[in-house]
Image: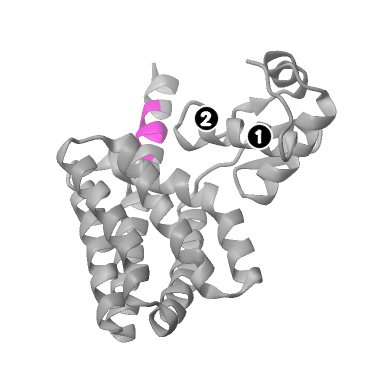
Amino acid sequence: MSFKAKESLSEQIAQHLADQIIRGDMLAGDRIQELRVAGELEVSRGSVREALLILQRRQLIDILPRRGAVVKEMSEAHVRSLYEVMQILLGLVIRKAIKVVREEDLDAFIELVHGLQIAAEERNLDEFFTLSFRFLEHAYPYARNPFVEDILINMQPAMQRAYFMALHLEGDEVKECLSFFKALVETIFRRDVRSALEIIREFAEHQSDLVEESITRARQIETAWGSRRKKS
């Protein structure tokens, strides 16, 4: 693959690597070797190094002494913290959106929900995933706060990683997510701040619990398997 600089070559590389982490093609603890990535993408090691710093800031990798860049572990505490902050910031965005949104502004949100409905019916998880974050990205500017928008954009890859996992953990999670987006649009239309904040809280807690439980189960299985191998 060959990359050509547009706005930022390092951003393009970061997005390429982020997609692999988000979708589980690279797992927690996997090393990301600058030289190999530079060779595969036909870019300089300096650009790769800058991309790794972006990924570190976005909570997808750790850069460790003597080990270099490794994919960040998704612990229960990490997931809980992520959803707690997302709940607060998204609540702020929606609260401010309810105050300023015009009826015609809702058309874009309704169109996105319609796309989510079709993707859910067709079990097209990739499309559903993409449209979910397109919906959120459309909402962010309503915060009218560049600091909040910047935090949300930097948090989004870590959020995508957890959300992608949630969509693939339970068959009914797509329905849960679709219900969340529909309910959110309805509360914006009614200008019902209290209900909107409650919907966001309930969804964040639900999905956080789902991902945390999966991580706990995986660790328990890994521990049990490791103990069995030692005995044998």
Q: Is residue 154 above or below residue 8?
A: below
Judge depth for marks 2 and 1 and give the one in front: 1
Say the numbered circle drawn on residue 230: none
Question: Looking at the picture, which amino acid does disc 1 mark?
Answer: Gln
Q: Quadrant of residue 187?
A: bottom left
Which badge, 2 or 1, comes first in the chain's sequence?
Answer: 1
Q: Which residues are magenta?
A: 220-225
Q: Is residue 72 left or right of residue 65?
A: left
- The residue lying at 65 percent from left, 70 percent from top is 147
Q: Quadrant of residue 64?
A: top right
The residue beneath circle 1 is 12
Question: Looking at the picture, which amino acid does disc 2 mark?
Answer: Gln
Looking at the picture, how far across and down is residue 144, in whole percent? 57, 75
- The residue lying at 37 percent from left, 24 percent from top is 228
On the question of residue 215 being in view, the answer is: no
Say the numbered circle drawn on residue 20: 2
Q: Residues within 10 Å of mark 2 (few under 14, many from 20)?
A: few
- The residue lying at 20 percent from left, 36 percent from top is 123
Camera-side residue: 147 or 60?
147
Q: Residues within 10 Å of mark 1 (few under 14, many from 20)?
A: some
- Quarter placement of the N terminus: top right
The overriding secondary structure of the stretch rendered in magenta is helix
